[in-house]
């Protein structure tokens, strides 16, 4: 068992590392309007607080006002040095650890400082303004430790630093008091003396300048540009948490996080069928469900994760981790968690006959009843976009299914007010930074600013500007704010109705669950019992009997058992009823809500001085009753929730945990009771910029295992390790325990999904992307490896590869006439930096008609290292590898784990283009799989300068057309329906490279269109022999066999396609048509049913299913299917004739006549009617019947 002292050593070690984080002075003052250097040689008369004339002469600021809010204040940064001096010092330290290649992820050198202070408008020191940088002290201590001059003690490190800081604080406060008493205004000499005292006995660089000042509140404006915090955001969090843990006062979630790996004997594999059967049984289903499409369930493992998180953490505080590979629906899972927690709190709310009684007045505050607390939800991440995506997507109208949009209206007026304010601010910022002529880059604006909002379910908070923007619409808007809601007189009957409706909905859900639980208990014990027979008849495909669990894994993963449309609707009704309970509860208790929320607005805008910690907690608990979910980055956690006590909030949901350094989550985990951590350790690992060798030496000195090092671990890996519920996969031939996994992938098409699945997930992912994605055309052609060789110019940069990107981008922009949804990614920072510069320099070649501002912004958003694009997606990705035979160390680093390749390829939804030396990279682990799966396009080597050829040397003759030319020409001719020309080009391509399955597949398609069916079948067969894992090859051959009248052969091929990819509606539709011809009408109906489940918008499936019902004389069902087909495609003339006949036999004579007329309108020549005389006889008879 891990002791509290052992646990406390971990945040203390992280504290040491975070002390080395340097304040970025250049970034802090970049946007300040009034700033100036203070060299040691500066005359006192040049200081604006000593010579106010400088304010007007130099900075054009008006005279000093008597109004304190309008007076100037001066932020002084003392002891300015370059970050490069710290890098040089660390490199000079005696270190034992040695590591291999690491890509340069550090930022360019910037300036930092030793301390910051403030000077008021009268030139006096502000007594409590001193902020001391931790890095110089830490560097001094570490230098002595590694040189053997001192034995550092991890357990007293924070206390030692606090003593140092307290000493300087006392010195500064005494100095400020003395200056104030004597009215002594600060001079340059005073600043120099302060700096000398600050740097005494600390590490000091060879070059150190005196200072820098920034004028604050100039002209009455407040600016957030410079931060008062000149140390890591996490220092205070880590110190407080270490103290709490050492005293046994940490939260359960934090203590579990800081626990060594649990024993293998305590682990449970959640993928075992008995475990799944138990935890996916009806009794464990959550009551609440998000208002999503009732026809669609969560996937098997999504539902398992929701059930386990709610059940396990509901029983005992702690943490639960979910492993979410790319595109597996992490946000979808979080929605259902939120829905159930809203329902749980509504259950507590309805216990109050009068909501006012849920509050107790205490001075100027109202205390909330404890039964309503513990449901607060905080979404946090290191990634700003990740947390904002969750809390922006939750209230977006697109998150709610169409059928619920008129009922999901929770405080919609307030939500619209908030959104309008945020959008207005965003629009202003965008207009200030870019023109409106070009589309945004992919993911550049994930805020859905143009989308409507359905309700006030979530708020994007965190940084100060977010809080201010939210409060503007939430509180200050005159018409749509929560204040306006609370001013209206409540109707008590609405509270009574809300309680009754909630009780009715809950009873309905519980009845359905209890019924299914009874079926679950009986169905395998007594499969022929009345209960089992009723269960199978009622639930159909959702019945979780023995047969259901014996299905292939790719079918099993797609949906959870026991859940059908009826239960989905009832659970969503309960969620909507719970939201109404919340709204009516707030309206009925208007007075306490108005009082507390007003103080909460002051709190988040920075007014905390008059509040104690308990009052702050009360304000937050009240706010969470109104807005169930908030988001913040870890960096903003201390500013936003800093004074909340340990374990005072209910739920923490951490997103993108695999890319976050482990120390970032400590403060958030300390404040919350329960945490659900979602991420993937096989995507990008955390970026930690400290010297790796230094970190390892400090670990050795302080006795810290590698598993706690930010160079080895992430939030996700620590949480997975402490989670007893998960599964084991193999990575780099080593077992890796991960949390509850999600396996259904819905983002990328082939080949990206298969490559990712193979290199990272042991082929456990089930790919469920839609066929329509595959059919989308791209100007750059299919996904491929473009083989461009070359010698590096400098570090990793191959000029020819950059030129190829410019060529491709030019083609893409000209074809689409907009800035495309495209990312250009490299494993190496130097390559992405060089590519950015190249694209900006050569924009005239590819960005016709766009402004420089458009281009610069798009390039900055669309080009970067793999780390830059974690959590994002685009239509296409160009992956620029770089490197040559002299870069083997860098190449080995990039291929040492699957993470870099995995993230790069899974950013691409539809197309992936890899540019690099295939011979060099294909020998590497993981990249060998990409080279096998991607067709190869060989680029000719750059032409040699003729001036370098001797007079005796003849130029080498090259073929007129390259492999690339044949492919491009063949594809172009295919699109133009010049099938014979395309056949000729692909035949030539095969002669140059006979081992690419796609070439045979395309040539087969051309022959199919020319009705050379035997030739098409032969080509499809060759494609299958070269790559037997591509489902579409079998489907294509099946279509050719069907036309060739080989119906059974076609069915066999369609069946093989379905076995490879069970989620393509077209495969089922084709097999259904073939079975109809065979005839196997029951099998055909089953296939059409499945096709419709997968693609509800394709009219052909309804037409054929209607035809079978028609032939069975089941005209009512036939009419329903025909009608749906017509609604989807009003030009589908054949359907009108069939429905005409079906309506005639259903005695709907007027309808039959109308359909006949419409068929003639669509096909005046009567070609839609094969038995025209019989139809005309029926129409005449129908007219007579109507007389």
Image: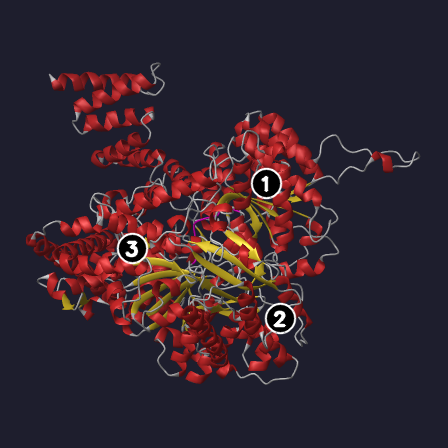
Helix, strand or loop for the magenta stretch, by majority: loop
Residue 1038, image x and y in percent? 49, 39
Q: Nearer the viewer, residue 239 or 664?
A: 239
Q: CA distance from mark 3 to mark 2?
A: 70 Å
* Residue drawn at (52%, 81%) of the image: 154
* Residue drawn at (32%, 20%) of the image: 1169
User: Mark 3 or 2 closer to N-term?
Assistant: 2
Instruction: Tell me if 971 is positioned left or right of 541 in this view.
Output: right
Residue 1140, image x and y in percent? 24, 25
Residue 631, image x and y in percent? 36, 58
Crowd rating for badge 1 (residues with CA inside 10 Å; few <14, some 14–19, many 20+): many
Residue 1099, image x and y in percent? 34, 34
User: Mark 3 or 1 closer to N-term?
Assistant: 3
| Residues at circles 3 and 1 in contact by the CB criterion of under 8 Å | no
Crowd rating for badge 2 (residues with CA inside 10 Å; few <14, some 14–19, many 20+): some
**From what the image shows, is residue 1106 above or below residue 357?**
above
Nearest-to-viewer mark from 3 and 2: 2
**Residue 772 seen in render:** no
The residue labelled by disc 2 is: 204
User: Residue 887 is drawn in which quadrant?
Assistant: bottom right
Tell me the element at label 2: loop
The residue labelled by disc 1 is: 998
**From what the image shows, is residue 253 above or below residue 940?**
below
The residue labelled by disc 3 is: 542
């Amino acid at each position: 068992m891990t002791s509290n002292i052992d646990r406390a050593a971990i945040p203390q070690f992280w504290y040491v590392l975070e002390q080395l984080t340097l304040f970025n002075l250049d970034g802090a003052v970049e946007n300040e309007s009034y700033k100036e250097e203070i060299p040691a040689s500066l005359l006192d008369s040049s200081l604006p607080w000593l010579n106010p004339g400088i304010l007007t002469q130099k900075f054009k600021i008006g005279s000093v006002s008597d109004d304190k809010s309008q007076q100037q204040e001066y932020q002084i940064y003392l002891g300015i040095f370059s970050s490069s001096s710290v890098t040089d010092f660390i490199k000079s330290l005696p270190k034992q650890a040695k590591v291999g290649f690491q890509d340069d992820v550090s930022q360019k050198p910037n300036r930092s400082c030793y301390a910051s202070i403030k000077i008021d408008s009268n030139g006096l020191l502000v007594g409590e303004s001193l902020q001391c940088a931790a890095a110089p002290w830490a560097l001094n201590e570490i230098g002595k430790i590694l040189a053997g001059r001192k034995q550092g003690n991890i357990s007293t490190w924070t206390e030692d630093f606090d003593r140092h800081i307290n000493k300087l604080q006392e010195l500064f406060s005494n100095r400020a008091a003395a200056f104030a008493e004597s009215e002594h205004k600060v001079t340059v000499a005073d600043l120099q003396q302060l700096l000398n005292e600050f740097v005494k006995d600390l590490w000091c660089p060879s070059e150190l300048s005196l200072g820098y000042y920034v004028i604050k509140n100039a002209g009455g404006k407040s600016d957030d540009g410079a931060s008062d915090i000149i140390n890591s955001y996490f220092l205070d969090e880590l110190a407080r948490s270490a103290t709490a843990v050492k005293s046994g006062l940490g939260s359960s979630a934090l203590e579990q996080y800081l626990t060594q790996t649990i024993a293998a004997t305590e682990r449970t594999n959640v993928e075992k069928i008995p475990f799944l059967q138990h935890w996916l049984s009806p009794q464990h289903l959550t009551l609440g469900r998000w208002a999503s499409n009732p026809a669609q369930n969560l996937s098997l493992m999504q539902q398992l994760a929701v059930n386990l998180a709610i059940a396990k953490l509901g029983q005992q505080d702690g943490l639960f981790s979910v492993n979410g590979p790319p595109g597996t629906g992490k946000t979808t899972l979080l929605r259902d968690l939120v829905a159930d927690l809203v329902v749980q709190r509504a259950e507590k709310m309805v216990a109050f006959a009068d909501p006012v009684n849920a509050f107790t007045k205490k001075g100027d505050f109202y205390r909330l009843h404890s039964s309503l607390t513990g449901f607060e939800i905080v979404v946090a991440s290191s990634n700003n976009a990740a947390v904002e995506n969750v809390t922006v997507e939750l209230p977006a109208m697109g998150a709610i299914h169409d059928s619920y949009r008129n009922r999901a209206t929770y405080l919609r007026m307030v939500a619209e007010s908030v959104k309008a304010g945020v959008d207005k601010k965003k629009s202003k910022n965008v207009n200030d930074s870019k023109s409106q002529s070009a589309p945004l880059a992919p993911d550049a604006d994930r805020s859905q600013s143009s989308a409507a909002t359905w309700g006030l379910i979530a708020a994007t908070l965190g940084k100060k500007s977010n809080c201010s923007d939210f409060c503007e619409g939430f509180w200050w808007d005159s018409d749509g704010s929560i204040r306006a809601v609370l001013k209206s007189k409540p109707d008590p009957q609405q509270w009574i109705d809300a309680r009754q409706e909630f009780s009715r909905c809950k009873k309905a859900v519980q009845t359905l669950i209890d019924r299914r639980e009874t079926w679950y208990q009986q169905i395998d014990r007594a499969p022929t019992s009345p209960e089992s027979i009723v269960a199978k008849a009622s639930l159909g495909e959702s019945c979780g009997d023995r047969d259901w669990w014996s299905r292939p894994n790719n079918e099993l993963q797609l949906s959870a058992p026991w859940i059908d449309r009826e239960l989905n609707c009832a659970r969503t009704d309960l969620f909507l009823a719970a939201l109404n309970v919340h709204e009516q509860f707030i309206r009925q208790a208007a007075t306490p809500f108005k009082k507390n929320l007003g103080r909460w607005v002051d709190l988040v805008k920075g007014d905390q001085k008059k509040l104690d910690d308990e009052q702050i907690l009360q304000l937050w608990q009240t706010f969470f009753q109104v807005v169930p979910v908030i988001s913040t980055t870890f960096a903003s956690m201390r500013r936003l929730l800093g004074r909340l006590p340990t374990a005072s909030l209910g739920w923490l949901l951490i997103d993108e945990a695999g890319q976050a350094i482990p120390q970032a989550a400590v403060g958030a985990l300390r404040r919350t009771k329960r945490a659900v951590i979602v991420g993937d350790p096989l995507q990008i690992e955390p970026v930690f910029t400290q010297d790796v060798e230094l970190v390892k030496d400090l670990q050795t000195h302080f006795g810290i295992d590698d598993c706690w090092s930010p160079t080895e671990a992430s939030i996700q890996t620590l949480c997975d390790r402490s989670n007893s519920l998960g599964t084991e996969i193999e990575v780099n031939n080593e077992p890796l325990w991960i949390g509850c996994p999600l396996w259904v992938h819905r983002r990328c098409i082939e080949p990206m999904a298969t490559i990712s699945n193979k290199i990272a997930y042991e082929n456990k992912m089930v790919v469920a992307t839609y066929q329509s994605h595959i059919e989308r055309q791209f100007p750059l052609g299919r996904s491929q490896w473009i083989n461009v060789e070359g010698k590096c110019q400098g570090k990793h940069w191959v000029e020819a590869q950059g030129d190829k990107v410019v060529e491709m981008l030019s083609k893409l922009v000209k074809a689409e006439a907009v800035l495309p949804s495209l990312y250009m990614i490299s494993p190496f920072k130097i390559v992405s930096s060089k590519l950015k510069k190249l694209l900006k320099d050569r924009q005239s070649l590819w960005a016709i008609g766009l402004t420089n501002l458009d281009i610069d912004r798009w390039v900055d958003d669309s080009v970067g290292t793999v780390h830059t694009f974690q959590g994002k997606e685009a239509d296409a990705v160009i992956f620029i590898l770089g490197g040559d035979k002299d870069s083997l160390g860098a190449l080995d680093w990039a291929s040492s784990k699957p993470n870099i390749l995995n993230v790069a390829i899974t950013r691409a939804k539809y197309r992936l283009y890899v540019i690099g030396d295939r011979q060099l990279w294909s020998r590497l682990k993981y990249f060998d799989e990409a080279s096998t799966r991607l067709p190869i396009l060989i680029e000719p080597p750059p032409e040699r300068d003729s001036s370098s050829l001797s007079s005796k040397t003849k130029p080498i003759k090259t073929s007129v057309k390259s492999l690339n030319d044949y492919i491009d020409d063949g594809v172009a001719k295919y699109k133009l329906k010049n099938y014979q020309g395309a056949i000729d080009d692909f035949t030539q391509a095969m002669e140059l490279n006979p081992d690419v399955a796609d070439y045979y597949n395309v040539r087969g398609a051309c022959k199919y269109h020319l009705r050379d069916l035997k030739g098409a079948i032969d080509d499809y067969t060759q494609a299958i022999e070269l790559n037997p894992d591509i489902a579409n090859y079998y489907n294509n051959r099946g279509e050719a066999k069907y036309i060739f009248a080989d119906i059974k052969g076609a069915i066999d091929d369609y069946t093989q396609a379905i076995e490879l990819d069970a989620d393509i509606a077209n495969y089922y539709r084709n097999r259904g048509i073939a079975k109809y011809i065979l005839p196997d009408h029951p099998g055909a109906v089953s296939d059409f049913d499945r096709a419709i489940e997968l693609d509800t918008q394709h009219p052909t499936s309804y037409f054929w299913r209607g035809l079978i019902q028609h032939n069975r004389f089941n005209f009512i069902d036939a009419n329903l299917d025909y009608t749906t087909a017509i609604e989807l495609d009003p030009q589908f003339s054949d359907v009108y004739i069939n429905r005409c006949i079906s309506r005639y036999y259903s005695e709907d004579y007027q309808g039959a006549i109308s359909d006949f007329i419409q068929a003639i309108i669509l096909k005046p020549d009567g070609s839609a009617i094969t038995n025209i005389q019989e139809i005309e006889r029926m129409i005449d008879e129908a007219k007579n019947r109507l007389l």
